[in-house]
Image (cartoon, grey):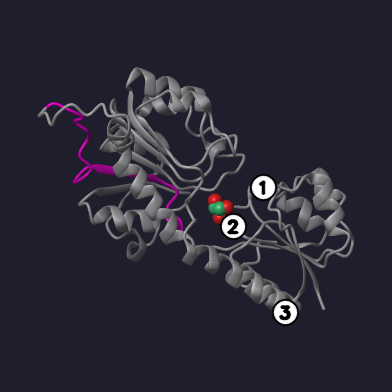
Amino acid sequence: MVDLSITRLLVEPVLERARNNYAVWLNDDDHIMSSDELIARSHESDALMVCHSELLSADVVAKLGSRLKIVANYSVGVDHCDLEALKSRGIVVTNTPDVLSDATAEIAMLLLLGASRRAYEGDQMLRHGTWKHWAPVEMNGIQVTSKKLGIVGMGRVGQTVAKRARGFDMEIHYSNRRRLPPELECGAIYHTSVKSLFEAVDMISLNCPATPETDYLINAESIGWMRPGAVFVNTARGRLVDEAALIDALQSGHIAAAGLDVFQNEPGGNPEFAKCPNVLMLPHLGSSTRETRKAMGDRALDNLDAFFAGQEPRDRLV
Ligand code: DGY
């Protein structure tokens, strides 16, 4: 049997399927595995199933065991993996696209609506007994309906966010490496630069992958391109954002509100955000539905099954 090491606890149906077909080692106390632990496991494994919490940097990849043939990511994002280093070791890498787009778009909409309509502050008033009375001028938020939404990264998740936002009559603008064909664009307005996008919209959703080119895409300069009173949502990766610059803009009110599911430091986030009442935060829950976490496991196992059957895995990246 093929030796498969699964580096985090997964939902039971996925573990059951894995155990039926592989000799599974499971990190069953679910701690985030250190580089040394990952390297040690790789020497006992033909395949690793890892999450975005396990860092496969070039240094780690150089020390992976020679038995290891494939890394099946239980994630769509692969910024935790040095793909070039894995490729040069001849290790196949796969991810789990498509299956988490709906769940992640739900969280993007939740954050967009919640940040705009001040859900965190309202919730706190009820919990702390500070709601004195209904008042015409109390807790006035920003209406989402009919606003212009700018989506950075119009891949599968970005397109799903656009679809949901159209339900709120939002006008969709986007920037992307390439313009989409009309059948995928569905009337969305393409911008060749992030500057032009930010200048044109009221609300922004980050949905692009984290790469060296997109690191700190949101910084003091690009925040300056946003309209005063913009609403900002990030369900992609924390490293896309200069968090200090975002905090300054939230404190000054240049950005009226933010909804954040991802942070540079996970777990923990950034304690300065917790001091901003105009920030709604979640602990990286984008793909966290029972349905999606099972679908991600199935997709990762489909990739492994194909590979060990001598076929091309559907989601092979290198
Ligand atoms: C992903 O799949 O990239 C999500 O962020 C969860 O890891």
Q: Mark 1–mark 2 contact, CB under 8 Å?
A: yes
Main secondary structure of the magenta stretch: loop
Q: Amino acid at mark 1?
A: His
Which label belongs to residue 67? none
The quarter of the displayed image where residue 265 is located: top right
Which label belongs to residue 21? 3
Q: CA distance from mark 1 to mark 2?
A: 10 Å
Q: Position of residue 229 (x, y in %)?
A: 28, 27
Q: CA distance from mark 3 to mark 2?
A: 21 Å
The reply, left or right, for residue 9 in relation to residue 206 is right
Q: Is residue 244 visible?
A: yes
The quarter of the displayed image where residue 300 is located: bottom right
**Which one is earlier in the sequence, the residue at label 3 or at label 1?**
3
**Residue beneath label 2, please?**
75
Q: Position of residue 50 (x, y in %)?
A: 69, 57
Q: Residue furthest front?
A: 129
User: Does the beta carbon at disc 2 come under 8 Å from ligand 1?
Assistant: yes
> Which region is colored magenta?
137-157
Q: At 68% across and 53% down in the image, what residue appears?
A: 30
Q: Mark 3–mark 1 contact, CB under 8 Å?
A: no
Q: Amino acid at mark 3?
A: Asn
Secondary structure, mark 3, is helix
**Residue beneath label 1, please?**
80
Secondary structure, mark 1, is loop
Q: Mark 3–mark 2 contact, CB under 8 Å?
A: no
